[in-house]
């Protein structure tokens, strides 16, 4: 299976990302979509203008996985705006949030998802290092926390399990960029190669 991985710069491809997000949310969290007006079958929110968007495309050029990195958001971040925990431990100018980590159902085998997440991690790490994001929030279900740890994205919970909007119980969590690199040395190697003097 050949995939293309990229940071989405806007235009038609970003619209396809929003349509893909709608499709996945309809499948896994239809109750979230019921309370919102997405009449064009594309899901986006107020944080998207303050986000870097990443996608995996399959051989047909269709979006099959996404993740976004919100940063420098004047609106705050979804996790801190929707959950209760101590956010004072994080410096605002070094903070971001990863969300909309979605993989198409037909690529959700452990092996294929691992390939996709491994490649998307490279883009995320390089972006976070480039813009100085040292830690990123996540609002994560217990099962998804375990899965991400298998894929060497070692989020740490920073608050108790609680209801997150219309999608059920989740933990407010944080991912340290430095730890992401330590746990994935090949990503540090890629970063260092790109920034050799």
Image (spheres, helix red, strand yellow):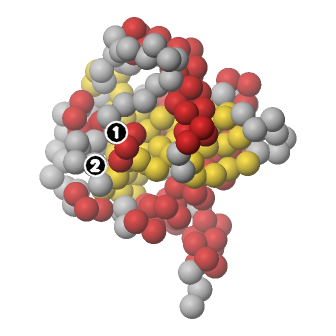
Closer to the camera, 114 or 196?
196
Q: Which residue corresponds to the image point at 44% horizontal and 61% vertical from the top-left? A: 128
Q: Which residue corresponds to the image point at 31% horizontal and 24% vertical from the top-left? A: 164
Q: Which residue corresponds to the image point at 34% horizontal and 11% vertical from the top-left? A: 35
Closer to the camera, 132 or 63?
63
Q: Name the side, left or right, on which 67 lies relative to 38.
A: right
Viewport quadrant of the N terminus: top right
Circle 2 residues within 10 Å: few <14, some 14–19, many ≥20: some
Closer to the camera, 99 or 162?
99
Q: Secondary structure at mark 2?
A: loop
Percent across and percent down for residue 136 are: 37, 51
Quarter of the rendering containing residue 59: top right
Closer to the camera, 13 or 27?
13
Residue 17 shows up from this direction:
no
Report the disc number at residue 47: 1
Residue behind mark 2: 73
């Amino acid at each position: 299976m050949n995939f293309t991985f990229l940071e989405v710069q806007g235009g038609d491809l970003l619209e396809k990302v929003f349509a893909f997000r709608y499709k996945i949310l309809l499948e896994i969290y239809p109750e979230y979509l019921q309370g919102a007006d997405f009449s064009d079958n594309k899901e986006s929110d107020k944080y998207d203008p303050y986000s870097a968007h990443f996608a995996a495309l399959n051989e047909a050029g269709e979006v099959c996985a996404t993740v976004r990195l919100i940063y420098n958001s004047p609106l705050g971040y979804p996790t801190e705006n929707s959950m209760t925990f101590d956010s004072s431990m994080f410096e605002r100018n070094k903070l971001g949030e990863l969300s909309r980590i979605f993989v198409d159902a037909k690529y959700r085998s452990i092996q294929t998802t691992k390939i996709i997440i491994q490649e998307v991690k490279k883009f995320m790490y390089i972006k976070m290092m480039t813009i100085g994001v040292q830690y990123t929030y996540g609002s994560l279900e217990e099962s998804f926390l375990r899965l991400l740890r298998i894929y060497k994205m070692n989020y740490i919970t920073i608050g108790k399990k609680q209801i997150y909007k219309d999608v059920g119980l989740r933990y407010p969590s944080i991912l340290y960029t430095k730890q992401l690199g330590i746990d994935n040395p090949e990503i540090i190697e890629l970063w260092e190669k790109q920034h050799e003097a």
